[in-house]
Amino acid sequence: MQSQIGQYNRICSKFYKKNILVIGDIILDRYIQGSVSRISPEAPVPIVVEESSFYTPGGAANVAKNLRGLGAKVTLIGRIGKDSQGQILRRLLRKGRIDIRGIFTDKGVPTICKTRVVVQRQQVVRIDREKIKISVNKEFNHKIHHFIENNIKSFDALIISDYGKGLITPELVSFLRQQALAHKKIITVDPKVEHFSYYRNVTAITPNLKEAENAIRDIKVTSKTPGQLGIHSDRLKGSKEINLAGKELLRYLELDALLITLGEQGIRLFEKWKKPVLIKTKAREVYDVTGAGDAVISTFTLSLTAGATKSQAAEIANYAAGIVVGKMGAVAVSREELLKAIEDH
């Protein structure tokens, strides 16, 4: 165990030397915390008395925040609206020392904002402000392509954080994959169910169990050759079904690795030519799973750039997820927290 801790310490000690590009859907998360003592006379709903509120970067911005917390340099690419929420996001990201030269303003959409009302550590309602815009105009696309082409050599890895809000398209993923392959860069994806067919030939993707089930269903419906995916059921109830699904998705999408996050059960890792590995959860308590996926892809990718094997990277990512689910909201994991969690176990 001591030798393993030493190995993980050496991997984490290299995080400061790495520079990661994150591209995806940027979200502003707002939290309203309060208490409830009575029911509204206007409708059968609780009256929440607001006690505090705060904003935090969400979506792809939370992936960037996690990477910064772990010590890496981070550049974020995405779009925000021309509004006060966009200004708040820019301010938060600058304060977090994240490079925002790749964030562009799109007058056609508002900044995506998710407001969560929390009472006694329990989320009672979420209010989303968004306008899904699938098409990305040519000028906007040109800015993204130009920025990546001019800066790709300086990055150690690319992370695509796809929340299905319109930025990530097949054309953009294809361009990113070509750039990553040409410059021998790691490229990982936190996927959106409907977009699984976009992600062929990337280094790794990190779906949760529900996303994997829905992806199988979607591939079977949309694929011109559904027989290529040798899975008979999209209900992944036990280890046997999960292992078959993971191996088939790995093969079908031609990935180097696939991580299926299983909540309280941990992570199952699939690699080419290797048996699936179950990495049991390191969480002591589970309060809120918000942001766990962001922690996993951030830590997994960064660990790979620092020389970890995929198995080691998945193990370290599992520690990070265990920290996040023990807190309220989409919080970032610090390198110090991560090292302490590893040593404590």
Image (spheres, rainbow, N blue to C red):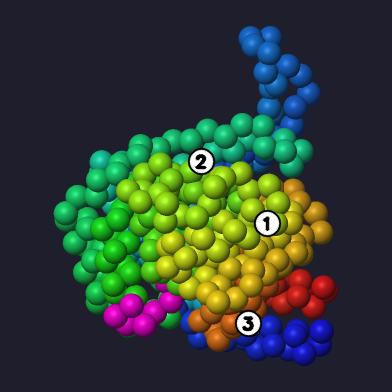
x then y, percent, for residue 320: 67, 66
Q: Is residue 194 visible?
A: yes
| Callout 3: SS | helix
Q: Is residue 124 placed above or below 154 in the rendered structure?
A: above
Nearest to the eye among marks 2 and 1: give it: 1
Q: Is residue 281 placed above or below 32 in the rendered structure?
A: below
x then y, percent, for residue 208: 59, 53
| Callout 2: SS | strand
Label ID, residue 12: 3
| Callout 1: SS | helix
Considering only order in the chain, which callout, 2 or 3, is on the residue closer to the N terminus? 3
Taking the image as shown, residue 316 lies to the left or right of residue 272, namely: right
x then y, percent, for residue 199: 39, 61
Magenta region, residue range? 181-189
Amino acid beneath label 2? Lys
Number of numbered tags placed on the structure image? 3
Quick check: marks 2 and 1 in contact, CB under 8 Å?
A: no
x then y, percent, for residue 207: 54, 56
What crowding class fits label 2: few (fewer than 14 Cα within 10 Å), some (14-19), or many (20 or more)? some
Q: Residue at x 36, y 57 (%)?
A: 198
Asked if the magenta segment contains residue 183, the reply would be yes
Considering only order in the chain, which callout, 1 or 3, is on the residue closer to the N terminus? 3
Considering only order in the chain, which callout, 1 or 2, is on the residue closer to the N terminus? 2
Residue highlighted by disc 2 = 114
Distance (Cα) linking label 3 and label 2: 32 Å
Taking the image as shown, residue 162 lies to the left or right of residue 335, namely: left
Q: Quadrant of residue 14?
A: bottom right
Taking the image as shown, residue 164 lies to the left or right of residue 137, namely: right
